[in-house]
Image (cartoon, coloured by chain):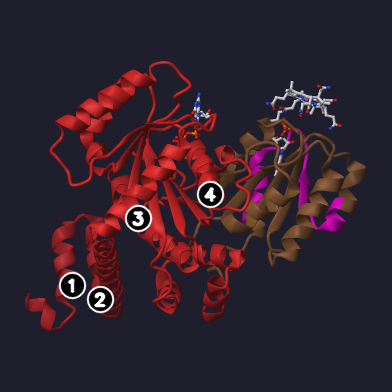
Chain colours: A brown, B red
Amino acid sequence: MRPIRVLVAKAGLDSHDRGAKVIARALRDAGMEVIYTGLHRTAEHVIQAAIQEDVDVVAISLLSGAHLTVVPKIIEGLRGQDAGDMLVLLGGIVPDEDVPPLREAGVAAVFGPGTDTSEVVDFIQGHVRTGSPA
Amino acid sequence: MSELAERLLVGDRRALARAITVVESGGAERAELLSRLHGHGGQAHVVGITGAPGAGKSTLVAALAGALRDAGERVGILAVDPSSPFSGGALLGDRVRMGTGEGLFIRSLASRGHAGGLSRATADAVRLLDAAGFSVIVLETVGAGQGEVEIMRLAHTTVVVTVPGLGDDVQAFKAGIMEIGDIFVVNKSDLPGVNITARDLTTMLMLAPPRPWSPPVIQTSALKGEGLDKLVKAIGDHGRWLREAGRWEGRAADLALCRFEEAFAELAVRRLRAVAEASGTWQAAAEAVARGDLDPYAAAEQALGSVSGAWTSV
Ligand code: B12
Ligand SMILES: Nc1nc2c(ncn2[C@@H]2O[C@H](COP(=O)(O)OP(=O)(O)OP(=O)(O)O)[C@@H](O)[C@H]2O)c(=O)[nH]1
Ligand SMILES: [Mg+2]
């Protein structure tokens, strides 16, 4: 069984990277292959990285408040490149009222401050196909 | 599989990325895909970049790739990192230093625990990038163990990266990495001590047994973009030298033979095991090993001995 591959992405001018790193490490420790983009990536860069790394999950961390613009853009880009099947997760500071439109746009789940990392691991393991690719 | 191959050949990056996943996963699909691509590629210059953790390999790879791209090359990057032996997972962070990598194709590969398997998956991934039309393929690995030395055999040109002020580095060089370097880079030339390190390296190279190609020592600052032109030139020079010395084609044949041996071994094991399992001798031997009734070597003989064929007498 091939390991689940996850892109942990930071987009925009947001420099809060603790949450992203905590999540990245937890997923690694759960046996996943985690590719971290580093800070200050554009939506286009996140899309390209997700495609090139052929990940199962795109895990976006945003604490800057830019989620309503950046996240739908990433999802649209993935769909436009035949990668609409990737599971998109969002974490960070996201006000409750923003969750429904994000879910509408294609975000599978939103995780806020205080999230237990095992919750995220369980969610991914429960939602990603781990059969053979292509 | 054939549709994937077609899309890869016309430059579809999604297809290339998927294809790498296929070869990483192994099995019949890999064999089918690689067979389809036979005869495509063969032109790419494969450049390996290795060196101690934190030497600046990823930063250098990105800067180098940018310079090569500006010179009209199509550059693909494979960044190889070890998987955790405990969880099997991996944190692949080379992209962080590679910036946005505009116009580049970058793929991170994890070792996934199987010795030898890493170099094979990497070799297959190189084949795919080659078939997809990349003219330069850059491989990054941490130059620590035997596995990495294996990977570096895939490269036409191996660049060994060191940094000033690491006394240990010279020790590491003695331990074997010295022989595999075609080009030596002292990175972080913006830091003090670069001249001393470069001089030490040059001395060591002079003391080493003479080789048909004399590796140059180049100072770079990947961070500031200094010395890259020299590195680009040295890589080009080495590639030309390989071709002129008739070594380029020989390497391709060696690598193909190596893949053949691996493929043969894999097929043989898979088929023999299937026969032993069908007759139940595999399970019997495995259980005896687990109980401690039989030592693993004798068990292997027993399981294999039950599979009849002309080869059993060899
Ligand atoms: C530490 C901190 C900083 C540090 C960041 C250090 C670093 N390297 O990360 C510093 C001091 C640099 C900083 C700066 C700023 N900060 Co600040 N910062 C915080 C603070 C106090 C804690 C964030 C943190 O690290 N938490 C610990 C980590 C582990 O938790 P986390 O990120 O929430 O992650 C968890 C979950 O959210 C989730 N998660 C997160 N990402 C992801 C991703 C996925 C895929 C999943 C599944 C889960 C997940 O899992 C994690 C584990 O539970 C928060 C307040 C708060 N309590 O959240 C403000 C906060 C985020 N900061 C804020 C602001 C405004 C700023 C500044 C703009 C302040 C300023 N005026 O200069 C700057 C901006 C800097 C920039 N360019 O981005 C605001 C953001 C407001 C908003 N979005 O509406 C906050 C909410 C404070 C506030 N209440 O106003 N900050
Ligand atoms: N001063 C200076 N720092 C550099 C230079 N090149 C890289 N660095 C820094 O060195 C650190 C490590 O760089 P990386 O490119 O990640 O090194 P690496 O060899 O790829 O590291 P691993 O993949 O973890 O083995 C980073 O903080 C870089 O910014 C340089 O030329 N000068
Ligand atoms: Mg690196």
Going from N to C along the chain, the mark reached first, 3 or 1, is 3
Q: Is residue A56 left or right of residue B202?
A: right
Same chain assignment for discs 4 and 2:
no
Residue lying at 61% horizontally and 51% vertically, measured from the top left? A6
Tell me the residue that label 4 is attached to: A33
Mark 3 or 4: in front is 3
Separation of residues labelled 3 and 4 (CA atoms): 18 Å
Chain ID at mark 1: B
Cβ–Cβ below 8 Å for labels 2 and 3? Answer: no
Q: Give me the chain letter of mark 3.
A: B
Determine whether, in the image, residue A92 is placed left or right of residue B82: right
Q: Do the residues labelled 2 and 1 touch (CB within 8 Å)?
A: yes
Q: Is residue B33 left or right of residue A124?
A: left
Say above or below: A23 vs B303.
above
Please indicate, yes or no, whether residue B85 appears anywhere in the rendered image: no
Is the residue B305 above or below the residue B251 in the image? Answer: below
In what element is the residue under mark 4? strand
Q: Which of B193 and A52 is in front in this view?
A: B193
Judge if badges 2 and 3 mark residues of a common chain. Answer: yes
Residue A29 percent coordinates (x, y): 52, 42
Is the C-beta separation of discs 4 and 2 under 8 Å? no
The answer to whether the beta carbon of the residue marked 1 is less than 8 Å from any atom of ligand 2 is no
Q: What stretch is highlighted in magenta?
A: A102-125
Q: Which mark is residue B272?
A: 2
User: Which residue is the site of mark 1?
Assistant: B304
| Residue A127, above or below B169 | below
| Chain letter for the residue marked with disc 4 in the picture | A
Disc 3 target residue:
B119
On the image, the x and y values in percent for residue B204 come to 21, 28
Task: Please name the amino acid that badge 1 sits on.
Answer: Leu
**Mark 2 vs mark 1: in front:** 2
